[in-house]
Image (tube, rainbow, N blue to C red):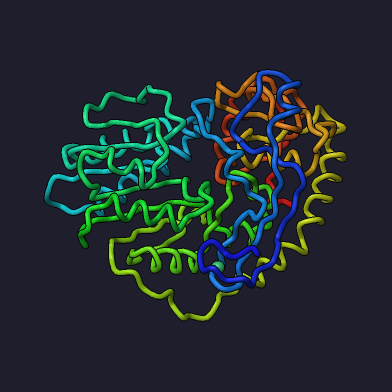
Amino acid sequence: MTICPICKGSSFIEVDRRARVPLLQNRVWEDRAGARVAPAGALSMMFCRTCEFAWNGAFDRSKVLYDPAYDNDQMQSDYFRKHVAAMARRIVDAAPKAGCLHVAEVGCGQGAFLAELAEVGGKRFASLTGFDPAWRGQLPSEAPNIRILQRYFGQETAYLMEEPAQIVVSRHTIEHVPDPIEFLRSIRTAMLNSPDARLFLETPDIGWIFRNFQPQDLFYEHCSLFSPRAFEFALASTGFELLQLEHVFGGQYLWVEARPGDISHPPMTAASELLADANRFVERRAEFVEKWGDQIDIVAQGSGVWVWGASSKGVTFALLVDPAGARLKGAIDINPNKVGRFMPISTLPISAPSELLDGATVIVMNPNYHAEIVEIVAEIGTNVTILNLTDI
Ligand SMILES: [Zn+2]
């Protein structure tokens, strides 16, 4: 029997089901043939009535492998870079003011955030150790106290840290982990057991996805999606004391600050409005896909319709409204590593903004990048209509 990975409860609803979705959204393909047969799995998103956690009940951990071909770099975006700098500043401000601080980042990608921390924190940090199986071995900037290990983080790798971490940060990683309780326990054992130690987590908020009707934010890689309540349950049962939880990045992400504490019972507070939001999401989902399909067919009379953003949201939106890759022209992306390649399963090509023709329409996948996209389009000087996902 399926049980909730966080509270072990058995009262939940299925909020979305899709038979064939790519295992990795951020893996693009050299040619159409490869993209067409990209490794795929099923999605069966569950939502727990008790702790308000959402998870993919069809997730198969043996299928997903993160390696150096994985590219989730969004640092070309000015908006995203500013967000990263602001989060680094928060950590430095919240860090203990004295002592020799050792920092660990779980799921550090190519080290951009560690480099930012090293720069903002200056001499405050004695060492910064990153863990990521997708590490390619090239730091974005020189920093002698940064060390990155091309490894998953867990009980068996925690010992690779030279000193117990006083600060552990994990951004956009826990949503990829099928057993977040085990993940948090591993972090807890790798941390300094002190009330001065800090854990910082950043991850998408399932509530934002439900309330804003964003089905393209549900995909295979994100097998574990938290709500504030789910964090209260998960942190209490793994020996953390929640200090602060707030929304960042235009409300899309949860930012959590916690410290080591005792294992405790989850709070007995009443459930939030989230179950009602989840039910509304289920009702609206089919309508969302149908409306966007119709809208694309109408505006396609011009010079074609493109999704802007060939990452998770763009890959998933394309598959929802155009699984055969027949309606949309392709995707636009500013990441040069993606341009000229193809998105998984829909096989839609990825182009640079300069390739847009007069009369084209783009659908912005992330509202946070709207202003930036308007600027890029104005610079190119092409007549392009820009639509947002929230327009329908
Ligand atoms: Zn639960």
Residue 379 spot, x, y in % from top left = 58, 25
- Report the number of numbered marks: 0
- Residue 126 percent coordinates (x, y): 17, 38
The answer to whether one can see residue 225 in this image is: yes
Residue 140 image-quadrant placement: top left
Q: Nearer the viewer, residue 302 or 127?
A: 127
Above or below for 132 versus 269: above
Residue shown at 81% from the left, 38% from the top = 322
Task: Out of 145 and 152, give the one closest to the viewer.
Answer: 152
Work out whether residue 7 or residue 196 is closer to the camera in this orientation and state it. 7
Residue ID at (34%, 37%): 130
Above or below, 185 relative to 343:
below
Q: Position of residue 226 (x, y in %)?
A: 52, 59
Q: Residue furthest left?
A: 99
List x then y, in percent, for residue 135: 42, 29
Q: Residue at x 68, y 20 (%)?
A: 355
Depicted 245 relative to depicted 115: above or below: below
Quarter of the image that includes the N terminus: bottom right
Q: Is residue 338 left or right of residue 6?
A: right
**Residue placed most toward the observer, 346 or 58:** 58
Dividing the image into four equal quarters, which quarter contains ligand 1?
A: bottom right
Does residue 265 appear to the left or right of 96 in the view shown? right
Q: With 85 as the anchor, is 344 left or right in this view?
A: right
Task: Locate residue 153: give its quadrant.
Answer: top left
Q: Is residue 386 visible?
A: no
